[in-house]
Image (spheres, helix red, strand yellow):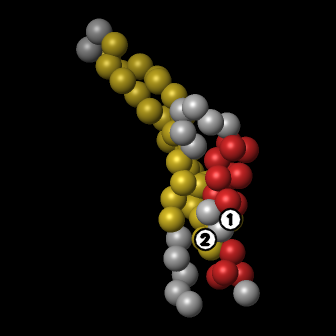
Amino acid sequence: MGKQQIWYEVEENETIEQCLARMQQDGYMAMGRKEEPVFHLVNGEPAYLRQKIQFKAIPFSNLE
């Protein structure tokens, strides 16, 4: 079976733990993490909005 990886993003209304639980329910486990800042414009200037967190996930079946 090929290595299938997908990215899960932590939604604004969920915690990191809830995102990891959602991944596990879908049959995936985290194999990496990346974060990047999200900005928006305020009076024509970029302003920090939030941190975007994503987990690289692979299916549990790839561990066998």
Q: Name the spot of residue 43 as percent of width and height, x first.
A: 29, 9
| Earlier sequence position, callout 2 versus callout 1 | 1
Residue 62, label in figure: none
Residue 58, label in figure: 2
Q: Secondary structure at mark 1?
A: strand
Amino acid found under the numbered disc labelled 1: Met
Residue in the foreground of this view, choosing between 22 and 15: 22
Q: Marks 2 and 1: CB-CB under 8 Å?
A: yes
Q: Quadrant of the N terminus?
A: bottom right
Q: Name the spot of residue 8 as percent of width and height, x first.
A: 54, 54
Q: Is residue 59 left or right of residue 52?
A: right
Q: Is residue 16 left or right of residue 48?
A: right
Q: Name the spot of residue 34 as percent of width and height, x first.
A: 56, 51
Point 65% across, 68% down: residue: 27
Above or below, 46 against 11 in this view is above
Mark 1 — residue? Answer: 29
Residue in the foreground of this view, choosing between 51 and 12: 12
Q: Name the spot of residue 18 as percent of width and height, x first.
A: 69, 44
